[in-house]
Image (spheres, helix red, strand yellow):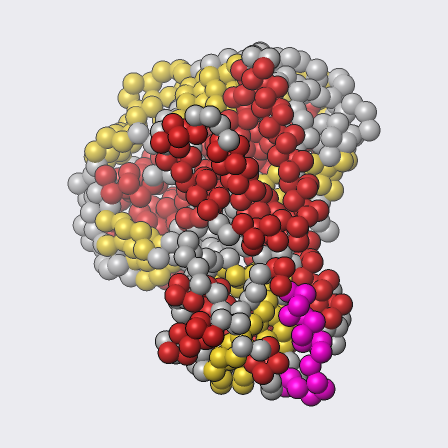
Amino acid sequence: MIFQKCAVIGLGLIGGSFAAGIKAKALVGQVNAYTPREDHLRIAEHLEYIDQGYSDIQSCVKDADLVVIAVPVAAFESVFQALSELPENWLAPNVVVTDVGSVKGSVIALANQYIPDLQFVPGHPIAGSEKSGILAVNPSLYEKHMVVITESSSGKQSASSRDKVKQLWEGVGALVKTMPVEEHDRIFAVTSHLPHLLAFSLVDTLAGDPAQQAIFQFAAGGFRDFTRIAASDPVMWHDIFFANKENMLSAIDEFSEGLNALRGALETDNHEGIMGILTRSQAARQHFQVILEQRAFSSLEKQSKESSKDMSETHVQHFLLQPGGQCSGEITIPGDKSMSHRSIMFGALSEGTTNVKGFLEGEDALATLQAFRDMGVVIEGPKDGEVVIHGVGLHGLKQPKGEIYVGNSGTTIRLMTGLLGAQQFASRMVGDPTIMKRPMGRVANPVNSMGANITISDAGTPPVVIEPAQGPLKAIHYDMPVVSAQVKSAVLLAALYAEGTTTIKEIGPARDHTERMLKAFGVEVEVDGYNISLKGGQKLVATDFTVPADISSSAFFLVGASIAPNSNLLMKQVGMNPTRTGVIDILKLMGADITLENEQFVGGEPVADIRVKSAQLKGIQIPEELVPLAIDEFPAIFVAASCAEGETKLTGAEELRVKESDRIASMAAGLKTLGIDAEAQPDGIIIQGKGNGDLAAPIFGTGEIETFGDHRIAMSFSMAALRASGTILVKDTGHVATSFPGFKDLAQMTGLNVEITT
């Protein structure tokens, strides 16, 4: 038992359900309760919600080592006063007092005034029902519901008392989170208290309308849903509004400012302004739904902030794959992720309206889209892959109100570092736990050398904090130390704002989508071999753009169709940028049967249909000049190498160590789990392929694969099931949506036996 005797002051829905829950779970030796309603006490005793009921507080709390205050906020002072007037030694030694109120600051102030010598642990269960009173009590009310515990400013609160209260709530099935007092009251002012106030206000306004009968008779479902909360207890909400007065006033002021902006845009026929408000609101609501459904980040699961991390529960999904199958049919892969990112960036910085088709509605690209919405850019969509971007020009971005959250997107945080480093406003970028470990010095250093003011952690990782540059950036000549399209692109974005001509010298071929797309938006970019030059101050002109299918996402199916027996797969209109086709070149060197059909140019980028058939692959020494052209596709290539005949050796791929995971170590570990001889090297890997000419023979065993939160690891090992002898469980696959929404459905369509499990 966590406590010997618990006294619950108040037997309404919240207090009664808590008492019933801890008694049903035998978490406390004895459960007493106080309420002035004798009939409620008798009901609670009869239903065995409590052991003993009392109509006076003193008798109820006698010898209690836990006191739970579950009365309306306005009644807290009288309860605290009653506790302060108890005879000496009336309560058990080291008694703990907690509460269930939805406002914490004013409650803590009262606790410090009346019971400064007692351990007080403020609590707030986020649960309820439309019904109230003793007859609504539910012992299971708190199961899978959140309970917030805040720190008291009282010096008597200890870690031990907090832990015991936390254990008690967890014992009744609650999800306990911690939060600073000030943040709690601010958050609940805007998410709970303000909506109730607005609902009361709207119904009150309409109730005075002469046509109120018709208004309420024909009100649609949205009106009914929103105003339902106006049927709540007026006395309770009156007390809450005044108990959280300062936060309520701030929330009302902020809402009024937004409402006035909406009115002004409507009055002046500002269609773009209205669209900006509506699109930002839609995106925010969709994000809210994502959090409610506990899926992966789709515009932002802001777990980088400790408080927000505490306020969300992570829902982990896995891929369960049955062995065998084939990879055949005709499919369309989602749009290219790299180009989707850049279409938003350049469309936002251009003058005019850019229409994008084929936009990848994956979480990484949505992070970039949300970042520009946060900086005041009006963006319509995405809807069925179509996005309309109302450009603000090179100098039209506005300071975001809060942190820019990039989720799991390395492209977003690195390219945006170059862009934000040139702005005349401060900003801060954070991401999910994986992103917060990514090296950022390689981007921050060259941009800082142009005059930017960017700081990162001592470990060289996010958060990325940008202060306004002291005047315009200056052009530089930059010799790239590594082959990286992200670093090159960040410098080019900064170069748009720099005085003079910036020249970048590469040491090898890297993706050139940035150079190509800048040209499509009217920027002159000079490319001379491995030297790229851009003169600052050029204007971007809006254009229409079609994003081809992503070659990186296609790689998994290139491998799947190559290793599975009787496969014949056609992928439509895949981007064939020569800086991206290393995976095709490598697979062909291994003997893959890959042909291109319907080759053409779309928006300055080469595209083609790709046909892949089953083939017996052979091991090779992967040419180092192809490594930069296939850097993201190597996890899939490693699966192909396992099915090849003979040894495959990769060198010169140190970059794989600093991706979403250490992909060399991650893949080597997974391959070994499935029975493959894979030896990780500092800059690559050696894989002993098990192919023997029989395309139907199993190559991989059975097992559970750790993905380390890396979407490409997850999708690569999904393809391994095509040649497995048993079931493969690929764990933690939620991040697949970052780059390839709909992967499971497409995989099933082609013949893989994959299901989602939790």
Q: Is residue 308 above or below residue 537?
A: below
Taking the spot 43% from the left edge, 25% from the top edge, the residue there is: 211
Foreground of the two, 503 or 515: 515
State the count of labels. 0
Taking the spot 46% from the left edge, 17% from the top edge, the residue there is: 355
| Quarter of the C terminus within the rendering | bottom left
- 186 relative to 381 in the view: left or right: right
Coordinates of residue 753 in the picture (x, y in percent): 23, 49
Q: Is residue 557 visible?
A: yes
Q: Is residue 382 above or below residue 657?
A: above
Taking the spot 62% from the left edge, 44% from the top edge, the residue there is: 430
Q: Could you say which quadrant of the image residue 371 lies in? A: top right
Q: Does the magenta-highlighted stretch encompass residue 418? A: no
Q: What residue occupies the far front of the structure in this picture? A: 210
Coordinates of residue 314 in the picture (x, y in percent): 47, 55
- The residue range painted magenta reads 76-92
Taking the spot 68% from the left edge, 30% from the top edge, the residue there is: 399
- 726 relative to 100 in the view: left or right: left
Foreground of the two, 646 or 719: 719
Q: What residue occupies the far right of the structure in this picture? A: 470
Foreground of the two, 195 or 691: 195
Q: Does the magenta-highlighted stretch encompass residue 91? A: yes
Q: Is residue 40 above or below residue 208?
A: below
Q: Could you say which quadrant of the image residue 531 lies in? A: top right
Coordinates of residue 501 in the picture (x, y in percent): 72, 18
Coordinates of residue 186 in the picture (x, y in percent): 65, 48
Foreground of the two, 570 or 155: 155
